[in-house]
Amino acid sequence: MEYDSFLDRQPGGAVTAGTALHFTVRGTDADSVMLMLRQDGQAALSTNLAHTADAFEGATPPLSSGLWFYRFVVVGPRGTQILAPTRTGLGGVSVAYQEQAAAAWYQLTVVARQETVPAWYENARIYHIFVDRFNNGNADGHVNAPKSNTFLYGQLTDDPYYVKDGAGEVVRWDFYGGNLQGISQQLDLIQQRGFTALYLSPIFEAASNHRYDTGDYFKIDPVLGTLADFKALVQAVHARGMHLILDGVFNHVGRDSRYFNALGHYPTVGAAQDAASPYADWFTFKHFPDDYSSWWGVMDLPAINKQSQSFHQFIAGGPDSVLGYWTGLGVDGWRLDVADELDLDFLRQIRQLLDRYPDRVVIGEVWETRPIRWHTGPDART
C-alpha cells in the first residue's frame, strides 16, 4: 500500500476553509484502510476509505480553518500498519510504521481565505542566486573592492573553505567574487532555461560572503558592484519580462554594522559603543557591551529587539524606508528571512507598505512545521 501526499490528495497544497479533500491510497493488499484526521490540539477522527478496483478512496467533510494532521491505518495480511511521512510536517511518499506511537503525521493547512497573488508570480519559475558564487562579470576576473582580512580563491574550481578560530567562529571569510554584472551577463541563458524570476541572496553591504550579517541596508555591497550596477540589473531583468526578488533580513544585523558597530569600522555611533546610540533600542543587552541577544546564539548576528518601533519605521515606515527605497527602484518582491521570528505587527506593517506598490509579493521563510499565528480580525493576513 502506498500514498504520496503530492499526488494522492486533491486538491493539493493549502486549501480554503469549507473545502472537502479526497484521498487515494494506492494498492489492494489490505482488508481496510482508515483515514485518521485531527485538528491541531484535538483528538483524531477516523473515516473508513472505500475499496475500489485498485485503491482505497474517501473524502473528508468540509474543513474549518486551522492546522490539520492526518495519516492512515492499514489492516491486512501484514497486520496493522500506519502509513505516514518520514517526519511530521513533511510530504511525499509514505512509509509504513508498526507502532502507532512512532508514526509521524502529514500536515494540512486550511486557511480562512486564499491570498491574491500577482499573475507573474502565480506560475513563476524562480532561479535562486547566491551572488558571490555565481558569476564574476569583470572581463579580467578581478574581484571588486576586496574586504580586509578575507581571502580570495585562486581558481573557480577551488573548494570552499572557512577559516575558523578555536570556538568555531569564522575569522576569515572567503570570496569567489561573483557580482551583479555577472548576473546581468547571464540573464539570456537563465531565461532560455525557462526561468521567469530571480531571487537573490542578500546583496547589501556586510562582512561575510552570505551577507545575512547586514552592515548597511542602504548600500550595495561593494564586492557586488555599485548602485548603478543594481539599477542596470533591474532594468535588464524587466526588459526581458522577468522579475526580481530580494532577500530581506530584518531579524538581526551584523556585529560589524553601522547599527551595532562593535568593531568600530563605521563612523556612526553603534549600539555596542554607547548606550545613548540612536540604535540602542534596536538591541537587547544582558551585559553591556559584550553580552547581548543574538540569532540562535551566533554572536556575529546581534538580534533585533522585536518591539523596537524605531527599527520597524526604519525598515517599513514609508517610501524613504529600507523597503520603500529599494522597492521604489523596481524590486518586485521580498523574501523575509526567518519571518516567523519577526513581530506580527511588524509583518503587518511590511505588508501594508508593500501593498502600496502594485504586483509585488512578500514571501515568508518558515522552516518550522507550524505556521505563523495571525490574528483573526476582518483584515487578517495569511
Image (cartoon, rainbow, N blue to C red):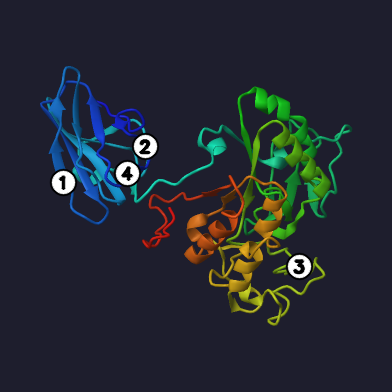
> Mark 3 = which residue?
263
Secondary structure of the residue carrying numbered label 4: strand
> Mark 2 = which residue?
91
Q: CA distance from mark 3 to mark 1?
A: 58 Å
Q: Residue at x 64, y 79 (%)?
A: 288
Secondary structure of the residue carrying numbered label 2: loop
Residue 193 is situated, as x and y percent measured from the top left of the image, at 63, 23
In the displayed orientation, state which residue is furthest to the top: 53
Q: Residue at x 77, y 52 (%)?
A: 220
Q: Give the camera-side residue of 379 and 44.
A: 379
Q: Does residue 358 sit above or below 196 in this rendering?
A: below
Q: Residue at x 72, y 53 (%)?
A: 204
Q: Earlier in the sequence, mark 3 or mark 1?
A: 1
In the displayed structure image, the side of residue 74 where residue 314 appears, left or right: right
Q: Earlier in the sequence, mark 1 or mark 2?
A: 1
Check whether the beta carbons of the residues at disc 4 and disc 1 lie within 8 A of each other.
no
Say which quarter of the image contains residue 314. Answer: bottom right
> Mark 4 = which residue?
108
In the displayed orientation, state which residue is furthest to the bottom: 276
> Mark 1 = which residue?
45
In the displayed orientation, state which residue is furthest to the right: 140
Check disc 3: other Cα within 10 Å, few if <14, some if 14-19, many if 20+. few
Q: CA distance from mark 4 to mark 2?
A: 10 Å
